[in-house]
Amino acid sequence: MSKQNNTFERVLVGVDDSADAQLAFRYAMHRCIKDGSTLIITSILEDNEMNVYQALTKDYVHGERTELEDHLKEYRQVALDAGVKKVELMVAEGDPGETIVKDVIPASEADLLVIGSLSKKGIRKYFGSQAAYMAKYSPISIMIIR
């Protein structure tokens, strides 16, 4: 984090097509435009969404990863069109919360993580399980958008 004006140099946001992730993406873009920060957009290819045969098929996993990378390029273009000057993309595989905290944050050298978390009822009233994990274990500053 920059010492002046509480600006961040590298802002990481995880995206998918959920409403809360879209809200976080819009906030992260706004923050990067305001601060002149680099926006790092990540998405996680979740192992648990594949059956065992898909996971063992190299072509399937490669195709899924390529599709996800292409989708992230669309997000990059939206950010550039909105006025973000520098955008980086990162794709990783695994459990989203854990992978972002343990792998993506260190590799990206981000100093702010922006995540979305829609309010839920019951035990997950304040955060979804992935957001709660990242909020608890993130080694960097975190901004939770609702």
Image (cartoon, rainbow, N blue to C red):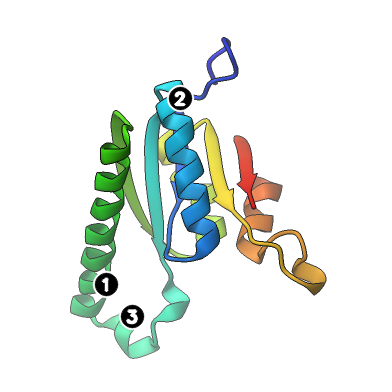
Residue farthest toward the right in the current orientation of the protein? 122
Mark 3–mark 2 Cα distance, whole angstroms, equals 41 Å
**Residue 68 position in % (x across, y down):** 29, 64
- Which amino acid, mark 1? Glu
Tell me which residue sits at (24%, 52%) in the image.
73
Sequence-first disc among 2 and 1: 2
Tell me which residue sits at (29%, 31%) in the image.
86
Residue farthest toward the top in the current orientation of the protein? 4
Circle nearer the viewer, 3 or 2: 2
**Left or right: where does residue 66 sit relative to residue 34?**
left
Picture disc at residue 55: 3
**Residue 47 position in % (x across, y down):** 42, 73
Circle 2 sits on which residue?
A: 34
Tag 3 and tag 2, C-beta contact below 8 Å: no
Residue nearer the viewer, 76 or 110: 76
Local secondary structure at mark 1: helix
Mark 1–mark 3 Cα distance, whole angstroms, equals 10 Å
Picture disc at residue 64: 1
